Amino acid sequence: MRHRFLALLLLVAVVPLAACLQKETVTTIYIRDDGSIEWAVLDQDVHSDEEDAGKRAEEERTYIDSIQGGIDGLTKGFRALGGTNVRSLVVRDRAPFATLRSADFEHLNQVWERALKSCQLPHRLELTTDGVVTTWTMAIQVDLESLQSKSPADCDSEAIEAVLSDSDHMRFVLESGKFLSATGFTMVGSDTAELEEVDSDTIEKNGGLLTFSLMWERGK
């Protein structure tokens, strides 16, 4: 199931997705000591649920061909966001398939700023470092009625697809060091934080303001 927070943004983006491809997707954002990140998306157990064997094979082949050719929506989204060292790899080349796509970015805000700005979503992004401690905050003002009234043309769909990536889980992982505090995340050990589920009730409870924050100490 798509992450609910990402699904809310989909009300704006309306990212086109293959209707019959089933898969489990995990997005992992690796944070390096210098603040740069690697954004990696792993698709596992990818298969079509199309009953017709010919159509099933065609749908799966289209998926694999697009990734091998680096022309799938996610890979194009990474480029649209200014990602470097964009990589697209087929890990398992027969059903159920597995693929891994990733890209490097200068910092967390590089990814979110363009995606949120392109959809005209009021937001605040902060990334500060004091010695060995870094704090990242993302606050988004969400109006569900306004989101539903927007059209796909209101957004940079490629940029949004890179952020959404149809993920079941979105995890932030430190290459070294430890997280000191988190808001809007569930801690999984000292070096991993997973984005919490957000639904419309959560948005209403918080007056439409969604705040996500991470504080971490760089490895020594």
Image: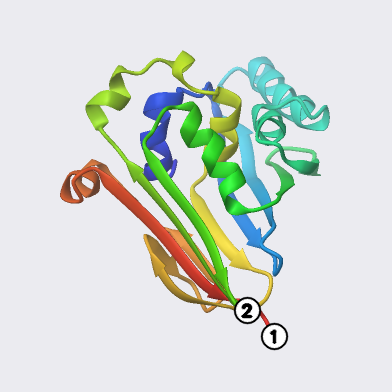
Image coloring type: rainbow
The number of discs equals 2
Q: Nearer the viewer, residue 188 or 93?
A: 188
Q: Residue at x 60, y 78 (%)?
A: 131
Numbered mark located on residue 177 in the image: 2
Amino acid type of disc 1?
Lys
Q: Nearer the viewer, residue 187 or 125?
A: 125
Q: Quadrant of residue 177?
A: bottom right
Q: Position of residue 124 (x, y in %)?
A: 41, 47
Amino acid type of disc 2?
Gly
Q: Residues within 10 Å of mark 2 (few under 14, many from 20)?
A: some
- How many angstroms separate mark 1 from mark 2 (CA)? 7 Å
Q: Residue at x 40, y 57 (%)?
A: 212
User: In the rendered image, is residue 178 in sight?
Assistant: yes
Which residue is tagged 1? 220
Q: Position of residue 189 (x, y in %)?
A: 51, 77
